[in-house]
Image: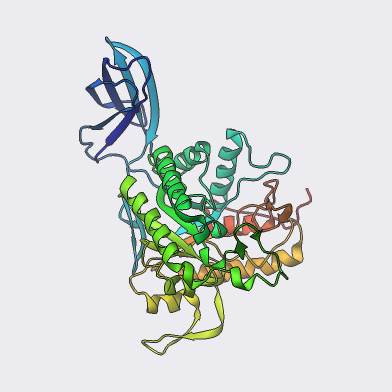
Amino acid sequence: ATTVVRTHIEESMIGGKMLELRHTLRTPDGKIVSTTTTPVKTHYSRTTSVEVKLPTLNRPELWSDVNPTLYTLRTEILEAGKVIDTQQDRIGYRFFHFDADKGFFLNGKPTKLYGANIHIFFPGLGNALPERFHRQEMKLMKKMGCNYMRTSHYPRPKATLDACDELGILVMEEQPYWHGSIRASGGEDAIDNSVRLIRDMVRQHGSHPSIIAWNTINEVMIAPSYKPGVGHLKHGDPRRAAWRINPKEYPYLRRHLQKMVDTFKEVDPDRPVSMVVGGQWKKNDVAGLTSLADMVAYNGGAMYLSEEPLIGPKTGKSYSFKPDYYRELYPDRVCIMSEGILNDVVFTRGEWAREEVAWPVNAKYWNLINQRPWFCGGSMWCFTGYGQNGMLDLHGAVDRYRLPKDLFHFYEAMWSDHPVLHILGHWN
């Protein structure tokens, strides 16, 4: 394994001095693997950046969803032999790739991604939550059997990603660009803001072994009607149709998305970059967006069984499951679900009649995914209930208080490797 450490020493009172940079790598049980010392000269009024390649690590213990092995890297700044600053990070060694024909591979092993989307929201606290909350939430996801999470629709706190590193939960992290926020009306300022957001996110989170992909945008083609100077136009407003996403904006959307992808590739060339399409999936192809990213992930309306069979243009075959149809259209495209399955089955905890509808729906779609080796898996919508715009959405395998619904245990029985016995009914 190769380890490259990029250290940034901010300008301070030590500007203009000769210092030493010392990197110590330790195994999970604390044994020193290597110690590397590098001389550094700092500069006044600017950050000093140093890139150091550590000695090659032979036969490292690999990080995986089943065995999340973490090494410890300690970075020290020394002045005249005395340590004046330290930074400690946990890192993992793994290799992975997405294959259009065979699915996702982690450390050479085919691995189906079983996961969920998740919002940061808790009643009475909003999204300003303590670190222990994020760790407990990830433990709950792991108990349900998740080995994957998509951070819809914004980056996560370090505590969440630390917990994913520890528990073995793979992550697709998303910059904060939901559908309504990428419009031509944003102009160059919006593109520049994307670049800044991406650089900040990758610099802060790029060392987490749990992150296997970055996502650019979510469902851009279902953006609500928006008129500059007025804002989002409500249902019933006669101006709505004229201010939806329109073909005149397509060149801007392509340029904006291309800049996002290019920036991700510049700051992290080793991870794939995704974009998410929803029910208006065809428009993304017409606009030329889906060819720009490494992967296209499918949401709800782009994921489900079609009401009318779709006929493949090359073979004439009839397809009811939309991803089968996409596979004929785009045989080289990686297939992964970004949202799906629970969208249309919404219920409160203990609402048994609706839960009984949810179980066969969830089982049906995961069976379709499991039967297709080329389908990487993905993330159902949504792990928790959440609040938005003053409303309360009741999606979720757990409710907004993180109390498991019966569906949670249904997933636990499908996905986890431990025995599950659950008696129906939420009353103790």
The residue at 49%/61% (across/down) is 184
Q: Quadrant of the N terminus?
A: top left
Q: State whether residue 111 is above or below residue 69.
A: below
Res. 314 image quadrant: bottom left
Res. 329 image quadrant: bottom left
In the foreground, 45 or 382:
45
Name the outermost residue toward the bottom.
316
Q: Position of residue 285 (x, y in %)?
A: 43, 73
Q: Is residue 206 left or right of residue 169?
A: left
Q: Position of residue 37 (x, y in %)?
A: 23, 22
The residue at 65%/45% (across/down) is 121
In the foreground, 383 or 373:
383
Res. 226 image quadrant: bottom right
The residue at 73%/71% (across/down) is 236
Q: Position of residue 333 (x, y in %)?
A: 36, 69
Q: State whether residue 14 is above or below residue 421.
A: above
Q: Is any atom of residue 376 visible in this view?
A: no
